[in-house]
Image (cartoon, grey):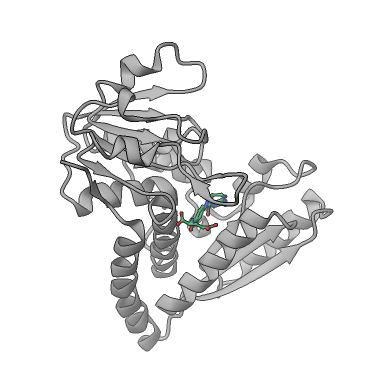
Amino acid sequence: MPAEIISGKELGNELRQEMKKEVDQLKNSGLTPHLTVIIVGDNPASRSYVRGKEKASDTVGISSEVIELPSSVTEEELLGLIDQKNRDASVHGILVQLPLPEQIREENIIVAIDPAKDVDGFHPINIGRMMTGQDALLPCTPYGIITMLKSRNIPIEGKHAVVIGRSNIVGKPVGQLLLAENATVTYCHSKTDKLTDYTKSADILIAAAGRANMINKEHLKEGAVVIDVGINRMEDGSLTGDVDFESAKEIASYITPVPRGVGPMTITMLLKNTIQAAKGLANS
Ligand code: L34
């Protein structure tokens, strides 16, 4: 039986409808969640994602502003802007779209954002809180992945979850969230020897390496749940995941597509975090 497809687009839209109701209520009580998105330079992919965030905010009634800075901006100037937004009580969420130009050290930017406004969940304070099981703003992509699994009541406890990729924004934190759900977690990465030995025993496989079609049915155990985080732009302009979808769906029990899989969930969880930050619950 071919795999069931988990559409992040559909699930995201359902969740956004619920969020709209909550935002309406907050607005009635005088609180309009506000998100500030900062984008540096003119990377077309970043522009497209930021436009998606702006549109999605609008749909649920979150007020948003996008601040565009030239690629020549200095670290000092960017830090100055962040400081201003940290102090502005009408701003509940601050997001600096990554990647940043070379002259700016990403880690300096991430730690400059007030952890209570860090709707990306990238600040070491939020990462530390997440890892120790405390209230935290969670990184959007990992949070979206867990939400997709839960939406289908996919068991996590006691299962072998294999994460391919160890980035700070996806691989590392998604492994931590799966661990918190009592999975047995294995991290694989570009230096892993005999990758298939690990993937073959995965009940849940998270492909977040950024290599187009690197996973196919030969890597999978029958009935595996396959979450594809890759967004690889092909020469013809189309988007492809890290998973060969047509091959993998023959053997998986559940699979996420690219596009319309994890990407829209990343944006949906950003909205959720912005509402959370506006309510002041996280990090309080
Ligand atoms: N600070 N930087 C910061 N926060 C983030 O959460 C991100 N990310 C990643 C890149 N840099 C970031 C995103 O927003 C990746 N990412 C992201 C968000 C949304 C989508 C993809 C990546 C998305 O909506 N993807 C659509 C296709 C969009 C298209 O056609 O270009 C999809 O259906 O997968």
Above or below residue 114? Residue 66 is: below
Q: Say left or right for 39 vs 146.
A: right
Residue 276, percent from left and from top = 38, 64
Which quadrant is home to the N terminus?
top left
Query: Does residue 215 appear anywhere in the picture?
Result: yes
Number of numbered discs on residues: 0
Residue 65, percent from left and from top = 61, 73
Q: Residue furthest top?
A: 193
Q: Foreground: 215 or 268?
A: 215
Which quadrant is home to the C terminus?
bottom left
Above or below residue 46? Residue 55 is: below
Residue 63, percent from left and from top = 51, 77
Q: Residue at x 61, y 47 (%)?
A: 110
Q: Say left or right for 120 vs 135.
A: right
Above or below residue 280? Residue 135 is: above
Q: Residue at x 32, y 83 (%)?
A: 25
Q: Say left or right for 189 vs 89.
A: left
Residue 157, percent from left and from top = 17, 34
Q: Residue furthest right?
A: 72
Q: Residue at x 45, y 42 (%)?
A: 241
Query: Does residue 138 appear anywhere in the picture?
Result: no
Q: Residue at x 51, y 49 (%)?
A: 239
* Corner quadrant of residue 194: top left
